[in-house]
Amino acid sequence: MGAEENLDLSQLLANSAELAAPARATLMSIVSRLCGGLTAFPRALLQRPLQGIRDGTSARSLVSAQLAAAAANAVAADKELVKLAAEAYIPEEIRKLRNKARIAVAAAEDFSTENSQTAAEPDEDWLNKFIRYAEDASSERLQTLFGKILSGEVKRPGSFSPATLRAVSELTQELASDFEWAWKRCIEDEVWRGPDLSRGDGWNRLTRLRDAGLMSPVASSVHQPAFRPDTLYSPWIFGRIPHPHLVLEMTRASGLEIPVVNFTSVGAEIGKLLPEPDIEANLLQVAGSINRSSVAKITLLRSDGTTSLLWEAP
């Protein structure tokens, strides 16, 4: 989305035919607050400071004007230079408003895409913090994330903490890539700590995520529950019902454990902004790593109630 585009938020929401009127009204109230009462971001607003630059250039000496014109022509021929020039000369207030307007568009698009029928005003203190972070979000990646955060908070107030707002605002491209890598491995609020997380690139990624406060700095494990000798096989469920999970039928008590690394509460909230991980595929990886000396059977139980026998003792 270019800086010169007209960001007409009212029209965007009007085009969302499935959006219920009360939800639309609430969302537009928040958007209006975010953008300082504006529901459109006119191209003319950006042209004012640029016109002042042009006028100032024309008032210079003939030689300076000719040199400036030659430089302007060179810049105009290079799209990247045009973008850099705009960033350099557009006043800070307009830059912040542009950032917030783009986030408002991203929020409205996310809200209408999910066809949400209800909306609620976020907490006043939360919204004030959000606005401060939003005005400095100049990259498309951050604007998209903040748009999803605002949409999610409107749909379910309390979904995102102020700590998550700060963490997202400080999310570098490298750290975002690390987090996406880890989230794809997620089972619930944890990842299996397989061999690749103990060395090499996996360890480096995990270390950066821990330093950023997105994953727990403490190693953890899921242990076999208390053995029940009164049953033929004592069951051990790994995962969380009703999501896909593993059922291990144990033949005896043992020291069997599954090493994991937990996401922090901030990390778990950021994970809501990403596509759902393939929990079933991640569980299959875990199943393949389990020491089977005290196991009679390993079964995958899916959300729809269907099962797959993954392994059974001969």
Image (tube, rainbow, N blue to C red):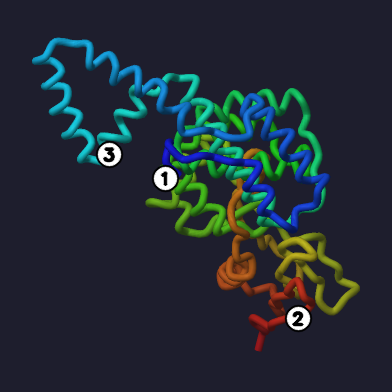
Q: What residue is shown with label 3? A: 80
Q: Nearer the viewer, residue 1 or 268?
A: 1
Residue at 75 percent of width and 58 percent of height: 18
User: Which tag is nearer the camera, tag 3 or tag 2?
Assistant: 3
Q: Is residue 45 above or below residue 111?
A: above
Please tell me whether mark 2 sits on a helix, a strand or a loop: loop
Q: Position of residue 271 (x, y in %)?
A: 61, 49
The answer to whether residue 166 of the structure is visible from this angle is: yes
Amino acid type, mark 2: Thr
Q: What residue is shown with label 1? A: 204
Q: Which residue extends farthest right?
A: 230
Pointer 1 and pointer 2: residues touching (CB < 8 Å)?
Answer: no
Residue at 57 percent of width and 38 percent of height: 103
Left or right: 24, with 231 as reference point: left
Q: Position of residue 105 (x, y in %)?
A: 59, 42
- Asked which quadrant contains residue 279, the reply is bottom right
Q: Nearer the viewer, residue 198 or 191?
A: 191
Q: Nearer the viewer, residue 142 or 115?
A: 115
